Structure formats: C-alpha cells, structure tokens
Image (tube, grey):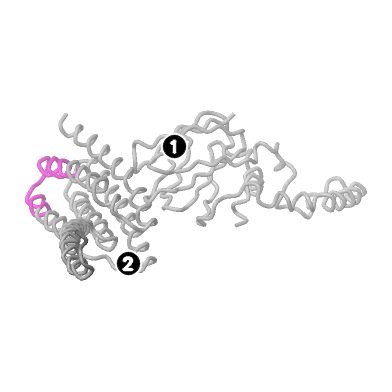
Amino acid sequence: MKKNDPKENHLHKGADDVAIENEQSVPASIEPQKQEPNAGRGTSRLWLPSICGIAIIIGGALLGCSRGSSNTGNADVPAKAVAPAVASIVVQVSMKNIQYDPATVEVKKGGAVEWKNEDLVPHTVTSASFNSGTIASGQLWRHTFTNSGNFPYVCTFHPQMKGVVLVK
Amino acid sequence: MNTPIVDRYLTKPKTNLNLLKSLAVILASIAVAAVGTANAEDNASASAPTDAQIAMIVVVADTVDIDYGKLAAEKTSNQAVKEFAETMIRDHSSVNDQAIALAKKLGVTPEASETSKSLKANGMKEMKKLKALTGAEFDKAYVDNEVSYHEAVIGMLDKTLIPNTRNAELKSLLESGRPIFVAHLEHAKKVQASLNN
C-alpha cells in the first residue's frame, strides 16, 4: 500500500532525478485496489502541527551543530526531493473497452500517471522511452515523468489503443 | 297467466343449464388459450439458453479461438499474423479465466447445449482444414476465418447471449467482452487487408 502513495513515489524519484535522462518507471503495485490520491491527507493535517513543532525543535538543534554534517538522520528523504505540490499529483488513466481514458493527459514535470487495467484482457503502456510490460486485468502501473515533452504511447497488444502524456 | 311457483322452480334449472354451458365454453376457450401461451413460453425457454449454457458457450467460443491462435502462432512466419494470433491466445485465455472464475463464484456449472456443441464441432472442422494448409495460404485462411468467427461471435453475443443472461455479473462480463471482440474483429480486418495487398 505504501508503494502507491504518490508522495512517496515522487520522493523516491526525486532522490536520483539529476542523473536520469529518460523516464524511469516506478514499480507497479500489483494490488487491484483503487488508488486514492487523497488517502491519508486528513491524517497528515492532524499531524501537521506536531510535525512542525518537532521540525522547529530539530531545526533549532541542527542549527547549533556543524553545517557540514552529511548525516541528517533522514537519508531516505533528501532535501532536494521536496517538490511543488502539483508535481506529486498522480493522474489516473483507465484502460477499458480497449481504450485509454482519457487518451490525453497533462502532468507537471516530476508528476506521475497511473494506468489501471479495467478490461478483461491484458494491456501495455509502451512508448519509445518507457514500457510497462504486461499489465494484467485489474492491475495498476505507474510512471513518473522527470522530463518535459510529449510522450505518445500505445498498447503493443491492441494497436488501436493510443494515448499521449504531455509533460509541462 | 301467472306461472305457478312450481313451474318457476322447474324452469330455473333450464336457465342454469344454459348458463353452465356458456360458462363451460368460455372456460374451455380460456384453457385452450392458456395452454397455447404456456406452450409458446415453453418453446421460448427451450430455445433461450440458461446461464449455465451461456457460460459453456463463452468457454467453448474462447477455447476454439485459442486453439486457432496456437496453431497460427506455430505455423505462420508472417509477423502481423503471429502478433494477432498471440493476442488472441492472450485475450481469450484471460476472458476464459474470468468466465470460469465467475461461474465458480456463482456456483454455476457450465452446461453443454446444441450451440456449444455446434461451436466445438465447427471449430474442430476448421482446425482440420487449417492444419492442412501452409505459408500464405494458411495465413489467409486463418485470418479470413478470424474475421468471420468474430463476426459470428459478436452476432451471437448481441442476439442470444447478452439478452438471455439472467445473472447480472455474467451479463456484465459478456458486455465487457463485447468491445474486446469488436477490437479483435477490427484487428483481424487490418491484418486481412495487409495480406491482400
């Protein structure tokens, strides 16, 4: 379930985005459960004041420490991973009735698209720079876009299925 | 002038008898009509497949096309035909798996019918014919058959299977399958056109 968290995906992506030339796929969740992009946000709000308080205390403590310290105690989430909120939005595309719906989606650089196979048959999401492999009926596949541009894609099994991701 | 009381009583049974005769005629007519309707309904239900028979028709229809696909994938050297055949194997296997899983969930045991038997028999006949062919002749015969087979299956879905399915989940599965078979038909027609060029 944690793998499906859009924020976490983005954070993982951001950790090495400088070296990435082409898009790199995020491993798909095999769980057929519906993605809920808002899941956990309410909880986050409840915890926000506490987290801010702790952050201020830790921040104050760190300010008193050596500035050159490379070990912040939070190596999984480097500072550069923090990105504009809009980039963490996961755009959903359904694969149903041998169609991508919507066929054209737009995301911000750093944002992700998640495809859900709601058909009875397997599909793929394949472009020159990314390839989902087989997405079985009921499964999800997510890809984070780190470069801007237009990315047309097809289903290699069903040539009539075509889509495009516009990354701004 | 005045009818004696006794006579009046005597005439009454006559009237009742006539009334009874009329009633008997009406009842007989209703009975005949009812029997006629019941027979018509019996005939209708005899021709309409049950959900168990529909499940078997779906499984047989898928299996026949999987077998055609396996033969084609093995025999053809044409890339477009091979890819199409592989898609048929993959897609019909997936639909079959889900149809069988649904039947299991619903406690429905697929049941053979004249339609499923006929599909199977025709499938075997076509397989025999295809096995005897090679090269471009095989490709053409396989793809031509795929076009007509998918047309027939879509027609059967529209006219017989979807309208007669009683269980909502099975009906939904068939309705979800329809656009897939339409896509297969389009794909087959494209491959057919490429072979004819």
Q: Is residue A4 left or right of residue A64?
A: left
Seen at 91% across and 48% down, the residue is A60
Residue at disc 1, secondary structure: loop
Q: Nearer the viewer, residue B113 or A3?
A: B113
The residue wearing badge 2 is B108
The chief SS type of the magenta part is: helix
**Residue segment shown in magenta:** B126-146
State how far apart marks 2 and 1 are (Cα).
42 Å
Query: Amino acid type of disc 1?
Result: Ser
| Quadrant of image for the C terminus of chain A | top right
The residue wearing badge 1 is A127
At label 2, counting other C-alpha atoms closer than 10 Å, the crowd grade (few under 14, some 14-19, many 20 or more) is: some
Percent x, y for residue A97? 38, 42
Residue at disc 2, secondary structure: loop
Percent x, y for residue A82? 72, 41
Residue B186 within the segment the image draws in magenta:
no
User: Which residue is outermost to the front?
Assistant: B1
Query: Amino acid type of disc 2?
Result: Val
Residue B12 in view here: yes
Residue B113 in view here: no
Check the residue under mark 2 and report the chain it is in: B
Seen at 69% across and 52% down, the residue is A40
Disc 2 or disc 1, which is closer to the eye?
A: 2
